[in-house]
Image (cartoon, rainbow, N blue to C red):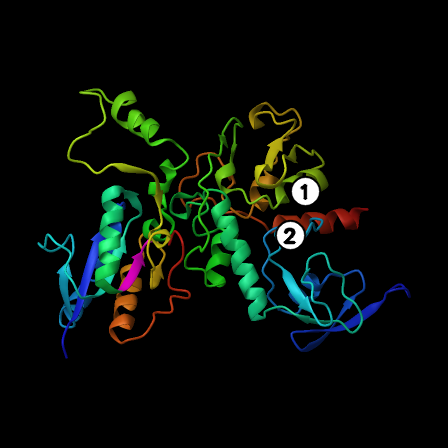
């Protein structure tokens, strides 16, 4: 049996969902026999590849770069999993949404800065007006709420998908879990 | 001795033959018989207002859905509490509540103890189909002991009712209409300078979400004690 091509993506999130993924401990070894990690912050691969079977996406869409990435990931993946509350609801990143981007940047980089005040302008992606859930931009196949979803939940999701089933999360996770 | 005027109605709820007193609601009779009907605004011990629409049920012979909390039982009634149609509407209503304000469960004082969060899980909501509004809402921490966070308020009006009906202070009320509606203290003054608030904290403990909480509580730390209300009402009735 050929291994499933799995990718993970980190948009506007804290990487907690990726930490939770790693928290699977020895079950990672079991999964390693069944999957090939073709793209992830955890592996050294610069370009998101074609023909990905499962993409796990952490984080909200907050910048132009995030949007570009999620469109590419959707186009190149069979199954897209919205992983964690930031991807599903925009969660913490959305707390800036009631404010203007300029006010948010001024607050962080000018009002509260003690050294070299001024928002960065070069080499960083431009923030969009609001951080939004990824399903507002692309079709999502599986939603996994949780902040972060537990290692057990992520393992269950991956194991079910690898068995060709749609994971029924029921009592396993919830918003804020 | 039971007064002769007591009128018992027999009805069917989800195919079960049940009975209730004529002044009882469908929700009360369902609850007495262990039938779950979701609700967010209704609370035992307070008057019913039918505000949240979570308890909508189907009644045979009527196309219109009726809120179980304010619909009295009737002879021969056939009630369905859990059809696919009802589940769809309930999920829709709850999803709209999630989009209306900023319910950031992960950093909420009531995370893990919230009626709305638990209901979302029970109804199988894994995401919201409507665009979030992310409105700008205020937090009033002017009171010595309590905080109102409008980001988490679902306008169930439990605080308004408990303050008026049980505490007798009527500090809380509602201002505005529709999407602009807000709970207020006194004539929309800071809670801390309210002249009518007795500081009893009943509003905090009946609040289904993290909108009202005790100062100093951090994420997931606000446990609410709701048991007090039926006892308080019962004791008062006995004293009357």
Question: Measured along the vertical axis of the image, is residue B100 above or below residue A79?
Answer: above
Residue at numbered disc 2: B43
- Residue A126 on image: x %, y %: 24, 36
Label count reads 2
- Residue A164 on image: x %, y %: 28, 75
Q: Is residue B111 visible?
A: yes
As for residue A80 lying within the magenta part, the answer is yes
- Residue drawn at x 57%, y 28% is B191
- Residue B41 on image: x %, y %: 62, 50
Question: Measured along the vertical axis of the image, is residue A109 above or below residue B219?
Answer: above
Chain ID for label 1? B
Q: Residues within 10 Å of mark 1 (few under 14, many from 20)?
A: many
| Contact, mark 2 vs mark 1 (Cβ under 8 Å) | yes
Name the secondary structure under disc 1. helix
User: Which residue is at the far right?
Assistant: B4
Question: Residue B143 sits in which quadrant?
Answer: top right
Chain ID for label 2? B
- Residue A12 on image: x %, y %: 27, 45
Q: Residues within 10 Å of mark 2 (few under 14, many from 20)?
A: some
As for residue B17 lying within the magenta part, the answer is no
Name the secondary structure under disc 2. loop
Task: Please tell me which of labels 2 and 1 falls first in the chain.
Answer: 2
* A107 on left or right of B240: left
């Amino acid at each position: 049996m050929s291994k499933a091509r799995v990718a993970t993506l980190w948009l506007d999130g804290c990487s907690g969902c990726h930490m939770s993924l790693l928290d699977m401990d020895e079950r990672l070894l079991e999964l390693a026999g069944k999957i090939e990690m073709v793209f992830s912050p955890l592996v050294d691969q610069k370009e998101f590849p074609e023909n990905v079977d499962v993409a796990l996406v952490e984080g909200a869409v907050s910048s132009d770069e995030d949007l570009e990435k999620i469109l590419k990931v959707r186009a190149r993946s069979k199954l897209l999993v919205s992983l964690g509350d930031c991807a599903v609801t925009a969660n913490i990143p959305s707390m800036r949404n009631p404010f203007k981007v300029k006010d948010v940047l001024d607050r962080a980089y000018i009002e509260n800065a003690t050294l070299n005040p001024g928002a960065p302008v070069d080499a960083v992606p431009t923030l969009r007006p609001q951080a939004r859930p990824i399903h507002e931009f692309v079709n999502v196949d599986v939603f996994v709420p949780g902040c972060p979803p537990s290692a057990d939940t992520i393992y269950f999701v991956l194991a079910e998908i690898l068995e060709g089933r749609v994971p029924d999360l029921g009592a396993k996770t919830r918003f804020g879990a | 001795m039971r007064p002769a005027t007591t009128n018992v109605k027999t009805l069917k709820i989800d195919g079960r033959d049940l009975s209730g007193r004529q002044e009882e609601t469908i929700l009360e009779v369902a609850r007495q018989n262990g039938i779950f009907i979701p609700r967010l605004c209704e609370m035992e011990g307070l008057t019913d207002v039918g505000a949240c629409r979570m308890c909508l049920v189907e009644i045979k012979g009527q196309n219109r859905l009726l809120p179980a909390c304010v619909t009295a039982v009737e002879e021969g009634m056939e009630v369905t509490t859990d059809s696919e149609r009802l589940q769809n509407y309930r999920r829709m209503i709850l999803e709209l509540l999630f989009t209306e304000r900023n319910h950031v469960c992960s950093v909420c004082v009531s995370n893990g103890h919230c009626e709305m969060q638990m209901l979302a899980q029970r109804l199988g909501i894994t995401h919201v189909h409507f665009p979030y509004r992310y409105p700008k809402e205020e937090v009033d921490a002017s009171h010595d002991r309590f905080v109102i966070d409008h980001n988490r308020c679902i306008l169930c009006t439990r605080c308004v009712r408990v303050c008026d009906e049980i505490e007798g202070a009527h500090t809380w009320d509602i201002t505005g209409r529709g999407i602009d509606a807000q709970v207020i203290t006194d004539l929309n003054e800071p809670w801390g300078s309210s002249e009518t608030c007795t500081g009893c904290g009943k509003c905090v403990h009946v609040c289904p979400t993290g909108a009202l909480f005790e100062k100093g509580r951090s994420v997931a730390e606000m446990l609410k004690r709701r048991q007090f209300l039926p006892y308080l009402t019962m004791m008062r009735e006995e004293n009357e």
